[in-house]
Image (cartoon, helix red, strand yellow):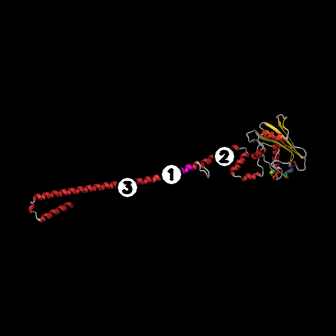
Amino acid sequence: MEGDDCKTARGGSQLRLVSLQAQNFKKLKLAKPLPLSEGIILITGLNESGKSTILDAVLYALFGRVIRPSKMPSNEDIISYGNGEAQVRLEFDIGENRYRVVREVHKTRPNRATLVEVRPNGTTKALANSVKDVTGEIERLLGGITYDEIVASSVVAQKDLERLIKQRLDDRRKVINVFLNLESFNKVQDQLDNERNGIEGTSRTPGHLTVERQRLETLNEQLNEYKETSVQLDNLNVKAEKLKKDQQRRNRHSIQDAQRVWRSGQRTRLSTARDRRQEPPHRQSPATTRQRRHTTVRAWKS
Ligand SMILES: Nc1ncnc2c1ncn2[C@@H]1O[C@H](COP(=O)(O)OP(=O)(O)OP(=O)(O)O)[C@@H](O)[C@H]1O
Ligand SMILES: [Mg+2]
């Protein structure tokens, strides 16, 4: 239970519990005001000793309602067994002002309630004098917050702890943040979750990061294909260059061969002409003709 600085849900002033007094409120008997110190209040005690009843007494003083046995208890539920009436009295601060609420529960008469503002000099100013008006005025002073909202946001009933423990980590963190009035953390957490989902995506919708990663993979694949093609192109260029050189060499050899043949032919023709000039044509024997042919063949072979 928080004994101080319970910020109202709609940005109203802070509620701070100051002291609690109870007579025959269930099994609670606090003849003297029980000071509710600042900070988080830890209530310890044996089972059934009345720990939760203290919280119920605070809630009943503020709103006329309790957590157990039901939100709208009967007078018998509230009054200690065997007694005819009960009273609860709570002093609390809202902002700079101090208030005192007193509720009386009767078996045979209508219930009564009063709310006063307690000035610093100890004098009081009446604010409401009926059960309905007191509850309405307290809700107004709290900035419109109701019993349901207080219980939902600032009170974790003992049996609800199990539910809290079983909640998913995220939900539990949110409930604890609400409990400690750290709702701004919940908002920032939600914003961060949304941004992260936008970037990383969910199982259904891929986020920016996933889309960009896939694009990068595709571009990498294309780059690798270009690299392979470039290597193939280089190899083809080397082969083409080699073929070109081979072709040029072959062409050079062919020209050299042709020149050699032409020069040899020239030599043969010159020597034949010389021979003809030295021997008259009618003196030539068949053997001489054969010899000349032979010389011509040799000239072609050389
Ligand atoms: N109208 C009543 N008059 C007297 N005693 C009551 C009344 N209503 C409930 N009780 C008693 O109050 C006790 C429960 O008190 P409470 O729930 O505050 O105890 P607790 O310390 O919170 O127990 P636990 O540790 O089990 O949570 C029970 O013994 C119950 O019989
Ligand atoms: Mg309890």
* Separation of marks 2 and 1 at Cα, in angstroms: 36 Å
Q: Which residue is mark 2?
A: 190
Apparent side of residue 61 relative to residue 301 in the rendered image (left or right): right
Find the residue positioned furthest to the bottom: 287
At mark 3, the secondary structure is helix
Instruction: Specify the segment rendered in magenta.
Output: 210-215
Residue at the spot 16% in from the left edge and 57% down from the top edge:
269
Residue 198 at x, y = what percent? 61, 47
Mark 1 sits near ligand 2, with its Cβ under 8 Å away: no
- Circle 3 packing at 10 Å, graded few (<14), some (14-19), many (20+), is few
Apparent side of residue 237 relative to residue 150 in the rendered image (left or right): left
Residue 68 at x, y = what percent? 81, 50
Residue at the spot 13% in from the left edge and 57% down from the top edge:
274
Residue 97 at x, y = what percent? 79, 36
| Mark number displayed over residue 239 | 3
At mark 2, the secondary structure is helix
* Separation of marks 1 and 3 at Cα, in angstroms: 29 Å
Q: Nearer the viewer, residue 11 or 206?
A: 206
**Res. 93 in view:** yes
Quadrant of the image containing the C terminus: bottom left
Tell me which secondary structure the magenta stretch mostly adopts.
Answer: helix
- Circle 2 packing at 10 Å, graded few (<14), some (14-19), many (20+), is few
Mark 3 sits near ligand 2, with its Cβ under 8 Å away: no
Residue 170 at x, y = what percent? 68, 50
Residue at the spot 34% in from the left edge and 54% down from the top edge:
244
Quick one: label 3 or label 2, which is nearer the N terminus? Answer: 2
Q: Amino acid at mark 1?
A: Asn
Q: Amino acid at mark 2?
A: Asp
Residue at the spot 75% in from the left edge and 47% down from the top edge:
152
Q: Which residue is mark 1?
A: 220
Find the residue positioned furthest to the top: 121
**Does the residue at mark 1 contact the one at mark 3 (Cβ under 8 Å)?**
no
